[in-house]
């Protein structure tokens, strides 16, 4: 396993190039923002995936950029979710319904927010209510060809 901190790697699966980039936790980090700008630049036919701890990185994507998927966590789905209300605490600026977990479109790019398996430390309660933990397997497809997954 390799930790990607403001860096990217190119992978090849069958005949498809995949650019996988990872940014640090702070969405205001200049090096991370420079990487996102490069990753979002037009051109190329590679699949571009941004891995970010905080979903707030999706709010920093340039309009019309070329990032095909952002995968994030951080919110733990809100940990405590009330019916008809949703997550009580998300510790993010993305909309509450997105912070609760799942696949959405934000700033023109697909964003997947995982609820994960843990609990927030610090000021948030160390409890999960109506927010089951999850481990997700994402299968990426294009034009009928499987790019990743079993």
Image (cartoon, rainbow, N blue to C red):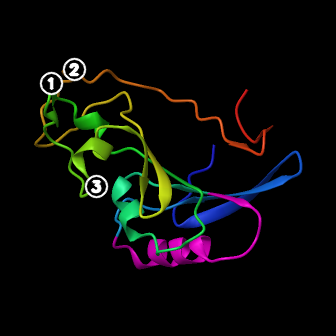
At x 77% / y 45%, what residue is drawn? 143
Residue 112 location, x and y as percent?
Answer: 46, 44
Callout 3 secondary element: loop
Cα separation between marks 3 and 1:
20 Å
Q: Quadrant of residue 121?
A: top left
Highlighted magenta segment, given as a residue range? 28-48
Q: Which residue is mark 1?
A: 83
**Viewer-closest of 144 and 134:** 144
For the residues labelled 1 and 2, say whether their Cβ atoms are less than 8 Å apart: yes
At x 41% / y 25%, what residue is drawn? 134
Report the side of 10 relative to 20 (left or right): right
Cα separation between marks 1 and 2:
8 Å
**Viewer-closest of 44 and 51:** 44
**Viewer-closest of 17 and 106:** 106
Q: Which residue is mark 2?
A: 130
**Viewer-closest of 30 and 109:** 109
At x 25% / y 52%, what residue is drawn? 95
Query: Which class describes the residues within 10 Å of circle 1: few (<14), some (14-19), or many (20+)?
Result: few
């Amino acid at each position: 396993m390799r930790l990607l901190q403001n860096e990217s790697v190119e992978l090849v699966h069958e005949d498809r190039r995949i650019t996988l980039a990872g940014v640090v936790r702070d969405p205001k980090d200049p090096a991370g923002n420079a990487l996102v700008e490069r990753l979002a630049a037009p051109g190329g036919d590679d699949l571009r995936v941004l891995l970010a701890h905080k979903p707030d990185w999706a709010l920093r994507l340039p309009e019309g950029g070329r990032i095909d998927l952002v995968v994030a966590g951080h919110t733990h789905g809100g940990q405590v979710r009330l019916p008809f209300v949703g997550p009580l605490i998300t510790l993010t600026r993305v909309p509450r319904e997105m912070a609760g977990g799942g696949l959405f479109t934000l700033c023109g790019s697909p964003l997947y927010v995982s609820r994960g398996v843990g609990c927030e430390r610090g000021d948030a309660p160390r409890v999960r209510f109506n927010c089951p933990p999850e481990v997700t397997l994402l299968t990426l497809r294009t034009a009928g060809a499987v790019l990743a997954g079993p």
